[in-house]
Image: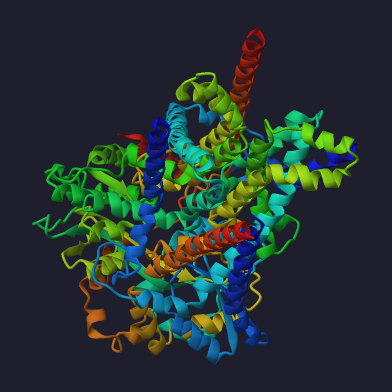
Amino acid sequence: MKKLRSLFTLSLSLFLLFAAGCGGSKDAKKEEAKVLNIFSWADNFNPQVLKDFEKKYNCKVNYDVFANNEELLAKLQAGGSQYDVIQPSDYMVTTMTKLGLLEKLDKSKMPNTANIMDKLQHTTFDPNGEYSVVYTWGMTGIVYNTKYIKTAPTSWNDLWNPEYKGRVILLNDSREVFGMALKKHGHSNNSTDPAQIQEAFDDLKTLAPNVLAYDTDSIKQKFIAEEAWIGTMWSGDAYFTHKDNPDIAFVIPKEGTTVWADTFAIPKGAKHKELAEQFINYLYDPEVSVKNYEYIGYNDPNTKAASLHAKSFIEDPMLKTAVDQIDRGEWLTDIGDAITLYDKDWTELKTIK
Amino acid sequence: MQKTWRSATLAAYTLAILAFLYLPLLILTLYSFNDSRINAVWTGFTLKWYASLMTNDRVLEALTNSLIVASITTVVSTVMGTFAALALHRYQYRCRTFLNSLLYLPILIPEIVMGLSLLILFSQTGVPLGKPTLIIAHITFCLSFVIITVGARLEGSRDDLEEAAGDLYATPWQAFRYITLPMILPGIIAGALMAFTLSIDDFVISFFVAGPDSTTLPLYIYAMVKRGISPQINALSTCMMTVTVSLVVISQLLQMKSYHASRKD
Amino acid sequence: MKRGKLLVVPAMGWLSLFFALPLLIVVVVSFASRTAYGQVVFNWTLANYIRFFEPLYMTIFATTIVTALGTTLLTFAMGYPVAYTIAMILPKKWQQAGIILVMIPFWINFLIRSFAWVIILRSQGVVNTILLHLGLIQKPLTLLYNDAAVLLGMVYALLPFMVLPIYVSLEQMDKRLLEAASDLGAPPVTAFRRITLPLTMPGVAAGSILVFISSLGMFVVPDIMGGAKSALIGNIIQNQFLAARDWPFGSALSIILALLALVMILLYYKALQAQKGGQAHAKNLA
């Protein structure tokens, strides 16, 4: 008994020592360097790009991750800004601006941000582009498997086809699902009109029997493994899915859709503001962005980089669809109190068997 | 004869349940050798995830953080929890209902609420977020589990032995060390196992109280979900599982050997 | 000897400081309301509590309780024999290894274990492929994204919370009692029902409570295994904080959930105590 315990303790401490050794040696070297604290989505950068930046500016990059905009907001509101660069999505930029959580950006210190395509310079969530710059963007469209669906869908209404019973997947996000139904009826995806929301809700109830699952995170796997035939998906995810299953196709429905973006922003009171500006500027350097976006697999908003990218990346059908049809998209903005209306209907939608 | 038949049935049932527990682990071991970037379908055999895991500082750092936090949490919450369980078992307290509520409520409150309330507490008192706050939070949610588990052991155990020891002029410490502790040791080990298990896999509470440079493995994995969890995590899990299972088996074999050796003497 | 009474202080002090104190904040927030941008304003309203009584939330609450009860019963049915085998049948020197082997799967991240279940159960998954090959079914069964899958996921997640406490109380049982029963001609089933089960009731109680409570707040399992189609109260609470940004309503729901669960636990212990009292009475009569 005693032996077992001491052995267990011994092996555990060995394990810890080994692990601490791995983590520790690296820190010691860069003790004197400046530090940049990034708070972002996981896997959102090419790690090589971060390493190059560390080298060029003689600093250490701390890269922490969140999984949800609201988590980011809660952390930021709790105060004591420990981060220098954050990556809120579109509507969250509006919210954070309204709550006074963001620092105004000095774009003269980030000349490379002028390389961003025009349509992403002025957005409804940050009209003058004062608080954020778009980093990744894409559109919500219909993804489908050509093996099972012979005629290409053109309208959101195609999801309602009774032949697709139990084969449809919708994004697990109330704004996306209601936005889709609102668009189908010709309304704005930011509607706060109770009558319009009710109309969308009544329609969604009739879609429920078709729905196999609501899923945002592992939706790619469901299409690659052909659990689902048709559904709503973001263009960036469609790119991934298509790579693993060539039968996958992606269209933007004629009624229009949601366009989304993750941005760079600097929180109020950031301790390493200058380094943060250098970082943002660095990422829009054409050559850096080629390296970065081909790794992460999202549309590159950098106009100067277009000619440098591999042809297969620029002409990828999934990514190209979004670029060609960006005018059909409408940004999501913070809709204030109406969110409680969405939430209640959303909850009720989930209880329909 | 009937007895062996019964034991065999029970053993078979237990093995079936163990298979149920290990089946998903088998699948993820298999997929750690899968060529695809996304865990969806089998596309071919590869060892690249193991190779790239070795150079992925972020994953290894997250694993280190997780192990440090879980080890400290386990020790502290097991010691405090055991003492509390002993005291609660042995003495009458006038504020019993209050103590019981304090004991059960941490399990009852949804994790997200506990995480947020701790975040508010720390930010209001100006405590910077990091590993210490992470450990404080973990101890908080593990304590109740330890107390309840050790308590289950004490319930129906014999109190008279320690009293007898007292009658024989043993100091309270001696009575505890030589009578009570060995008696409740399995309960303490079970409590410690539970604390370790809870801590190593906690995500929701950890998220709110973690600061820069204290990302744990679950935090890292949950954040990866949006892009698709990298098969490196499967590789890492396979390694962790192999290491822990072999540790158990080796220590068991060593123990058997020393057992036989001591029998020969 | 009274000094020993103070042993409870570190743990309870810790819980008061890091649990009860912050919880007071939550209680206060539950009486507040939200602004258009989701900030909390304190205006002492009962609206959040009244909202709970809408049929929509009551239905979800009832479903949650039923699911939690089902999970508790199933983990008991699966966990007791496992704990029994390890404590009573396995040789003493193997017991510790046995219990650790049961725990090891739970050190691997829960999320990726859940995704592994999806690979096993999906329409082109392991189970369906095998059944199709054997010719037992003609087209794939729907094993995922329904209530049964949610139940399976919950049982899988919570089994150790049942096994550990039961193992602990079985292990300390005086086995001579069973020999005595057998000597007196009691068949094993009777001995189990009259001796083993009652004596391990504290472990069963602790296990059931841990499982029942933990399953009330689950939200990852319904999302992954249930395809986010069956909302449980845990999902609704999660949504208030991570989508609707309605912290006051989320706080109120959490407090109602906690209080109801607390009442259930107290009733459960009362019932257990009454049963114990009854047995003692029967013993006295004999």
Is residue C225 shown left or right of residue B149? left
The image shows a total of numbered marks equal to 0
In the image, C138 versus A290, the foreground residue is C138
Furthest toward the left, the residue is A150
- Residue lying at the far front in this picture: please name it: B265
Residue A118 percent location from the top left of the image: 36, 76
In this orientation, which residue lies closer to the viewer: C160 or B107? Answer: C160
Q: Quadrant for residue B66, please give it.
A: bottom right
Write down the quadrant of residue A252 in the picture.
bottom left
Q: Position of residue C160 (x, y in %)?
A: 51, 44
x, y percent for residue B205: 58, 53
Q: Residue furthest bottom?
A: A56
Tell me if residue A189 comes above or below residue B98 in the rendering: below
Quadrant into which the C terminus of chain B falls: bottom right
Residue B8 rendering spot, x and y as whole percentages: 39, 39
Residue positioned 52% across, 38% down in the render: C88
Instruction: Tell me if residue B24 can be seen.
Output: yes
Scheme of colours in the image? rainbow
Is there any visible trace of residue A170 in the rendered image? no
- The outermost residue toward the top is C285
Nearest the viewer among A160 and B103 is: B103
Quarter of the figure that contains the N terminus of chain B? top left
Q: Judge by depth and name the residue closer to the eye, B128 or C150.
A: C150
Among the 4 quarters of the image, the one containing residue B24: bottom left
The residue sitting at 22% across, 75% down in the picture is A316
Q: Identify the residue shown where x is 75% and y is 39%.
A: B86
